[in-house]
Amino acid sequence: MVLGNGSRYKRLAALYRFLHAHTTHRATLSTLGPPPTVRALIRPALSQAAPGAQRQPWQHTQTRAITSDATSSAESAESALLLDRTISTSSVLQTVRECRQKHPQCVLLVRVGDFYELYMDQADSVGGHILGLQVVDKKFRNGSVRFTGFPARSLLRYLEILVSRHGMSVALCEQFQEPMRRSFTRRVTRVVTPGTLIDDQCVATTRVHNYILCVAPVDAAHAERAAFGSAAFDPPSVELPEPAAFDLGLAWLDVATGDFMTGAASSDTLSADLARIRPSEILVDESNAALRHLLAKAQAEAPAGCPSITPVPGASFRLVASAENLLAAAELATGELAAARALLNYVQATQLGLLPPLQPPRQYRPEGHVRMSAATIQALELLRPLHAGSAPGSSPAAASLLGELDSTRTSAGGRLLAKHLAAPSTDVAIVEARLDLVEFFAVSQRIRARVAAHLDGIGDIERAVNKLSLNCGGPHDLLEIARTLREVARIKALLRAHLDAPPRPPARKSAVRRPPAIADSGRRAEILAAVARKEQAMVALDALAVDIERKIRADADRDVRVFGFLKPNCSSTVTQLHRDLRLKDAERQAMQEHWQRQYTCASLKLDTASHLGHFIEVSKRDSEKLQANAEFRMIQSLKSKVRFENQRWTYLLSEIDMLRTRVQAEEMRVFEELRDEVLEASFIIRTNSKVLADLDCSICMAELASSRQYVRPRFVGPMESHVVTNGRHPVVESQLLDSNRQYVSNDCRFEADTRVLLLTGPNMGGKSTYLRQIALVSIMAQIGSFVPADLAQLHILDAIYSRIGAHDNLALDQSTFMVEMTEAAEILRHATPRSLVILDEIGRGTSTADGVSIAYATLKYLHDVVQCKAVFATHYHELIPHVVPTLKNLVPLHTAIYEDNEGGFAFLHKVREGVCTKSHAFYVAQIAGIPRAVLDTAREFAANHFGTNGRE
């Protein structure tokens, strides 16, 4: 936009101020933001547009550029004035305007009767375009506005569309009836964002955490310099050296479960942290352009899709949170404390002052977990297959490792397993304790079946407690908690009885031999101690469960506003109210039957409606019988029915309504008492939930070990060999078994003098599967699972890195080769001697000379400098004479192929020592269906120009 003299600046600012003041006409403003010169001019105008309005933490300033000309501006001004007159005649529209001024970044859903309604521009842009609702002009005294809506019972369905699918924020404006009056007041009771969505029906799955993440730089000024150098406003457009890394503080919270964590990170590792945490929403300081730029880049690299990024005011990172004592107990570092404060302030603002029950945040220690890059998590298909959709929070498909391992019976168990897979432990004591539980349930099949049966009956009590604390829960959540507490007592009794039972005599020699997966590890004392710790950690709250079950009906609705969820005999007050209500209902029925007989009018029916009040309805034919009696006054005549008013019926139904109101008030009182009891015991309930999740995961992996003949891994020191005998890829093996085929197992061995395995072989020979198999065995072992092998003697790894497959990244303007080099650079910078690196086809996206040189240098650097365990797969046969004789800690391996003299061939998928100098590309092309003529031409060309026989 080209600007003229100063007077034009003033006119432009005045026009912008006018349009910004009328929220319904912000569609005339684009989303690009005005140039800096205009921005400086109009910022004071924005501050004057809504004097006294308080900006909430989720409301970030979005300056907008002006695109309308003078004519359209005049039309907009005229429309705005007309709209103002229309709004002034309707209390609902006045509420809509006030709420949208307070929550300008939200879709506003207004409760009117039994509907949620959208008005003005949001009726078209949201209701019509996104929700597919019919939009009409709703008439008022001085005009009309655009309007649409949907039944209140469908709220969760539309929240799922707006928040989960489209990443929008929604403000819910509920209606409240004044006591003993027909008038209503309305106010926003909750702001729903992608990271604060807690309704089970609105999230894709409750088996993964729905985290909201806050990112705060430890030194904001340093972060700006590191990312943008000396640039004053925008990132430079020319190539610059790699920006310096800067430290970050992270805090993430699952509002639905109360899982609260903090951790330290850096700009280098942020994409890996996003891939591990998988947040649905990210909070960032709105004034920190460098961090927003970094997050946009990390988003593009993350395999789990793009979470919503919400800028929040910088002051929220410094404001003392209401739960400051909670943060003080955790002794957080500067960056983590700032992130945790902003996170809690944001959640409390969206929940209008409420916070779920929280424990002090647990600090994530990177050194206590296996480091894996975003590319590694994606390439190994740990949480979702490569072809899966990218919606945050979506369920993992069966083709991922999580999908293969997860047969947990509870949502909490599923969430725990996913968390373990994203961050395997490096603490041997923690891993061994998990393995002890798995072995216990693998060996003790009878108690495993009995505990599993009880797990089938429990609910997601973590989510239930937090929904109750945020006033989003109902009677159904109380019943779920009571049912789970009953099962906790039964499981605790089962484990205690097993621990107290005398040891069984040793099995006779004729007994059936145990399969290798559950062979005795010689850790009986440790295993029983692990079981005892879980039994002691569970606390039975029988009194609370009994109290809930005594008062709440078993078929109670999820909504606390639905009448009649209390058992009639739960208290003397409720019993008396229900008795009175039954008497009045009987009187109502007697009155209806009396009039039906008196006037020989079978169609007569006593009814009520919100817009008419209490009335008597009869058919058109019978209406004359009532019109002759002055006791009945006609109030409405329809095509086939006539409705009358009667004082006796009105008085009786008023008495019934008053009784129902008293019953509902008593129900709410009892519900709140039970809710308070639950919240007082929330720490114990959540502890029980965590123990049940541990047992669920252990039983899940024990069942897998028993059915698939997995073995318990044994961890050894760095001076011993890292050995896997007859290892298998768990997902591929499962898929082959489903089609009645056998997986070809392979060994892997790293000795003290053998750190690097150079893998060659034909295309389709199984190299990539072998690479992934080596990594997956170690990951499964370090989450505490038995592994698919006959023997697993393993080192504890501090990091696993992979570079497998070829793909570009258009969002970052990166070619296939650039992506390959970026991933390789991350590995070479961060791998340590305790890491495992698997590389497939380094240097393939460029010329042969350059590619071979890069592959050689990478392999030599891993061997000589990093000195980590590495498996390097390549088709560059030119490398072999340069590395096999010279790199003393390298062992060459190859995947075998069968060939006969008549052109027949078969891939054996067996890994053997030695090298293979043929890629057998023509065989793969033949399998793929390349025309015979093309293959003949290719073989002829290869023979003439490369001297090969067409089989290489």
Image (cartoon, rainbow, N blue to C red):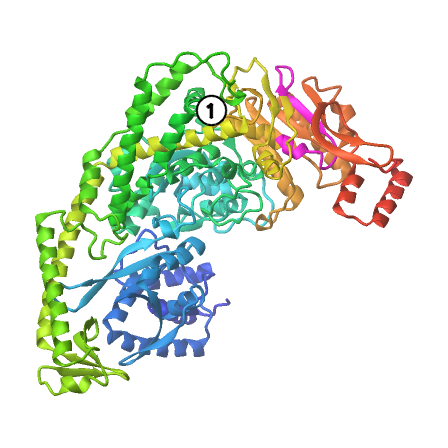
Answer yes or no: is residue 16 visible: no
In this rendering, the answer to whether 31 lies above or below 911 is below
Image-based side of 745 in relation to 418, left or right = right
Rendered image quadrant of residue 910: top right
Rendered image quadrant of residue 722: top right
Quadrant of image for the C terminus: top right
Q: Position of residue 864 (x, y in %)?
A: 65, 21
Instruction: Identify residue type, mark 1.
Output: Thr
Q: Callout 1: 10 Å neighbours few (<14), some, many (20+)?
A: many
In this rendering, the answer to whether 427 lies above or below 417 is above
Image-based side of 210 in relation to 641, left or right = right
Q: Let me know if residue 768 is in the magenta part.
A: yes
* SS state under label 1: loop
The residue that appears at 33% across and 36% down in the rendered structure is 337
In this rendering, the answer to whether 907 lies above or below 60 is above
Image-based side of 425 in relation to 724, left or right = left
Image-based side of 925 in relation to 477, left or right = right
In this rendering, the answer to whether 596 lies above or below 781 is below
Q: Let me know if residue 617 is in the magenta part.
A: no
Q: Position of residue 440 (x, y in %)?
A: 41, 22
Residue identifier under label 1: 426
Residue nearer the viewer, 764 or 166: 764
The residue that appears at 49% across and 26% down in the rendered structure is 782
Q: Residues in magenta? A: 749-771
The residue that appears at 41% across and 35% down in the rendered structure is 416
Rendered image quadrant of residue 563: bottom left
Answer yes or no: is residue 199 visible: yes
